[in-house]
């Protein structure tokens, strides 16, 4: 199983490099071709819009053989990326938008498919650690791949970046073929489809409901606070806009470091506690960004970079370990829609709220996160009588509610 863990981390490295290198270049390429900043921004919308189709695309993951679907999706993505070789003038800009949309659809399918495949490739007690390593790999690529992509674009143009990015899913497809999987029955699939089936599982299991809700709140708040952070940097502290890149790097560094230890924390404390801790750390990072001192903003970026991925990884691990195999695809995709969908509304609302004051907005966001974390922690403790939740033997956790071996059935430990 260690071999499978290495393969999954390698997949995250390669796919993270390819997508991160292309994402920034796509917008720059459109800007160079059209001279329109608004059109360049629409490339990002094309990437994130398919997230709203997550529950239905996740149903496809549940109906199709998962490894062949992941391999086919990567091969098709490589072919679509190579279509960018035809871009020569503004008349072909639509191809870049089409590729951005294809990336968005592939993200949904690959995220859901990989979440559904992980329990067949790894022991349940290793899911948290491997999810953390994968997160660190992806965050590491976000630090280097955009710079590499832009440098290659400046040197050889967009076609060269397209070829490099297309090579990544080809390599990923080959890695999927090397995984050693256990057979997992899907005979218990209910008739409910798409959003209804995914939401019924998320709402019906306490640990899943709690961790996914915490992640959704934290991610939405991160979008709501974006404009306030910009205002603190450029307006309150009167720093150059380039300082935002420093904060992004600080957050990426925190995410990389946090991902390396989150698996051990999940194994010791459970997904609910880690989700609460992540939300609280993210709130602390927001408070630090209110201080009138630029190093505090950097520290806040690192703290928030640790906390937000912890909350997300806790939710993803809970879904993987607590969902019947037959429903993993649609439940994972529905969870992604629930967690990331609200950010589309939170960003413009935050842009309006910043007129009330940047620091007030950040402090309000921090209060919301701390309040939610406190409520979840109090309820989780009151709902579990002594000795019933995550018992230990010899200082090590035994099988807990989020690692229930009967995850596909109703049982006393399923939440």
Image: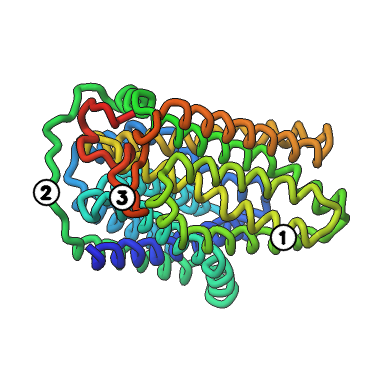
Residue at horizontal 30 percent and vertical 67 percent from the top? 6
Q: Nearer the viewer, mark 3 or mark 1?
A: 3
Instruction: Give whichever of 167, 176 is nearer the camera.
Output: 176
The residue pinned by badge 2 equals 183
Query: In this image, 130 relative to 241: left or right?
Result: left
Per the model, the C-alpha gap separating discs 3 and 1 is 40 Å
SS for callout 1? helix
Question: Which residue is pictured at 49% across the width and 32% down the height?
Answer: 213
In the rendered image, which residue does mark 1 sit on? 298
Asked if disc 3 and disc 2 are in contact, CB closer than 8 Å, the reply is no
- Of pointers 3 and 2, the one earlier in the residue sequence: 2
Residue 393 shows which numbered tag? 3
Dot 2 crowding, Cα within 10 Å, few <14, some 14–19, many 20+: few
Colour option used = rainbow
What kind of element bears circle 2? loop
The quarter holding residue 34 reads: bottom right
Image coordinates for residue 229, horizontal then vertical, percent: 74, 47
**Residue 221 seen in the current view:** yes
Residue 229, relative to residue 333: is it above or below? Answer: below
* Drawn side of residue 90 relative to residue 269, left or right: right
- Residue 375 position by quadrant: top right
Position of residue 187 in the picture relative to residue 334 (left or right): left
Q: Is residue 88 visible?
A: no
Frontmost residue, 146 versus 180? 180
Q: Position of residue 360 (x, y in %)?
A: 80, 36
* Comes first in the chain, label 3 or label 1: 1
Q: Is residue 403 left or right of residue 277?
A: left
């Amino acid at each position: 199983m260690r071999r499978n863990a290495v393969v999954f981390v390698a997949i995250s490295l390669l796919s993270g490099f390819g997508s991160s290198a292309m994402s920034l270049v796509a917008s720059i390429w459109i800007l160079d071709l059209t001279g329109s900043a608004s059109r360049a921004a629409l490339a990002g919308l094309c990437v994130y819009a398919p997230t709203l189709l997550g529950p239905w695309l996740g149903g496809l993951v549940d109906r199709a053989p998962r490894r062949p679907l992941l391999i086919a999706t990567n091969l098709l993505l490589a072919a679509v990326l190579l279509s960018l070789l035809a871009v020569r003038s503004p008349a072909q800009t639509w191809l870049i938008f089409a590729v951005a949309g294809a990336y968005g659809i592939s993200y949904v399918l690959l995220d859901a498919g990989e979440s559904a495949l992980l329990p067949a490739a790894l022991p349940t007690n290793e899911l948290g650690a491997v999810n953390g390593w994968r997160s660190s790999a992806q965050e590491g690529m976000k630090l280097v791949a955009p710079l590499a992509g832009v440098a290659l674009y400046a040197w050889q143009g967009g076609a060269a970046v397209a070829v490099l990015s297309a090579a990544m899913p080809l390599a990923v497809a080959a890695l999927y073929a090397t995984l050693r999987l256990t057979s997992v029955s899907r005979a218990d699939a209910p008739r409910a489809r798409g959003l209804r089936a995914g939401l019924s599982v998320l709402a019906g299991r306490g640990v899943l409901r709690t961790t996914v809700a915490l992640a959704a709140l934290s991610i939405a708040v991160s979008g709501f606070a974006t404009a306030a952070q910009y205002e603190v940097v450029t307006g309150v502290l009167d720093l150059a806009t380039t300082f935002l890149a420093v904060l992004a790097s600080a957050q990426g560094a925190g995410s990389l470091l946090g991902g390396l230890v989150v698996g051990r924390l999940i194994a010791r404390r459970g997904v609910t506690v880690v989700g609460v801790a992540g939300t609280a750390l993210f709130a602390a990072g927001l408070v630090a960004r209110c201080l009138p001192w630029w190093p505090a903003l950097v520290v806040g970026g690192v703290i928030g970079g640790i906390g937000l991925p912890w909350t997300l990884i806790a939710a993803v691990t809970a879904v993987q370990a607590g969902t019947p195999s037959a429903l993993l695809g649609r439940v994972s995709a529905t969870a992604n829609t629930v967690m990331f969908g609200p950010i589309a509304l939170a960003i413009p609302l935050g842009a309006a709220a910043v007129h009330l004051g940047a620091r007030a907005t950040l402090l309000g966001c921090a209060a919301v996160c701390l309040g939610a974390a406190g409520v979840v922690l109090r309820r989780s403790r009151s709902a579990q009588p002594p000795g019933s939740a995550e018992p230990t033997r010899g200082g090590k956790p035994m099988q807990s509610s989020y690692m229930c071996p009967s995850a596909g059935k109703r049982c006393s430990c399923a939440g």
